[in-house]
Image (tube, helix red, strand yellow):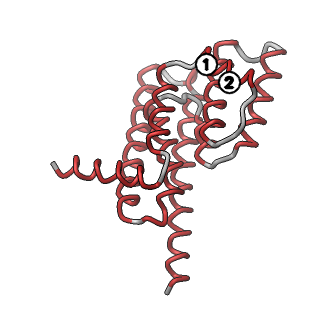
């Protein structure tokens, strides 16, 4: 019986990761095709995707409030979803790597961006935004940042990333996540 529970937990986690991947890919595809869509079409599609992310987040909260074995693994996904919804992160690729806890891929992406900036392939403002997102994700994943990276973060971090930092710190432990989920369930009952 115990192995069956592990199998179900594993399958649930896999399904949730696939759903998150699908939604993140949808956001990434939308950004890549932005110029091909008219403004209304783009905004409507983005709004629908963010609503799906919000519904997915609500589902995660319900699961987390009733199943302690998934709390720690699901809290990373929930933070990624909250970041997408609050638009602290505007790059779906970064959200996906953060949710999947892929610091090596984040560092590779950062190196590619440095190269693209040097050759003029990436505008400075987009570089700054994405570098902020990657460094924030790396910090939240417990990765050591260089002094230059820390300086870059403190100099360029906006309110959205600061808000994400505060929310993710507040959610830190499984107990806190569980407490937050309980509060959300109580709010929903009222």
Q: Are marks 2 and 1 in contact (CB under 8 Å)?
A: yes
As drawn, is 63 to the left or to the right of 150? Answer: left
As drawn, is 179 to the left or to the right of 110? Answer: left
Q: How many residues crowd mark 2 within 10 Å: few (<14), some (14–19), many (20+)?
A: some
Residue at 39% from the left image edge and 60% from the top image edge: 63
- What is the x, y in percent for residue 151? 68, 18
Residue at 75% from the left image edge and 35% from the top image edge: 107
Disc 2/disc 1 C-alpha distance (Å): 6 Å
- What is the x, y in percent for residue 154? 61, 19
The residue to which callout 2 is attached is: 150
As drawn, is 41 to the left or to the right of 100? Answer: left
Give the numbered dot on residue 7.
none
- What is the x, y in percent for residue 148? 74, 21
The residue lying toward the viewer, choosing from 182 and 189, is: 182
The residue to which callout 1 is attached is: 154
SS state under label 2: helix
Position of 88 relative to 79 (above/below): above
Position of 103 relative to 67 (above/below): above
Extreme residue in the left direction: 190
Residue at 27% from the left image edge and 52% from the top image edge: 185
As drawn, is 31 to the left or to the right of 81? Answer: right
The residue lying toward the viewer, choosing from 111 and 56, is: 111
């Amino acid at each position: 019986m115990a192995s069956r529970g592990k199998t179900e937990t594993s399958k649930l986690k896999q399904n949730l990761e696939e759903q998150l991947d699908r939604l993140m890919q949808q956001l990434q595809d939308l950004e890549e095709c932005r110029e091909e869509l008219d403004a209304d079409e783009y905004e409507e599609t983005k709004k629908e995707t963010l609503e799906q992310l919000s519904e997915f987040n609500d589902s995660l909260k319900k699961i987390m409030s009733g199943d302690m074995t998934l709390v720690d693994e699901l809290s990373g996904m929930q933070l990624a979803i909250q970041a997408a919804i609050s638009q602290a992160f505007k790059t779906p690729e970064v959200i996906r790597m953060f949710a999947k806890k892929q610091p090596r891929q984040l560092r590779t992406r950062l190196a590619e961006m440095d190269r693209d900036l040097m050759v003029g392939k990436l505008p400075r403002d987009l570089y700054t935004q994405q570098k902020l997102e990657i460094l924030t994700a790396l910090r939240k994943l417990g990765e050591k940042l260089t002094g230059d990276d820390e300086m870059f973060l403190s100099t360029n971090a906006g309110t959205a990333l600061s808000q994400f930092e505060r929310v993710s710190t507040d959610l830190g432990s499984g107990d806190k996540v569980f407490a937050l989920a309980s509060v959300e369930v109580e709010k929903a009952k009222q």
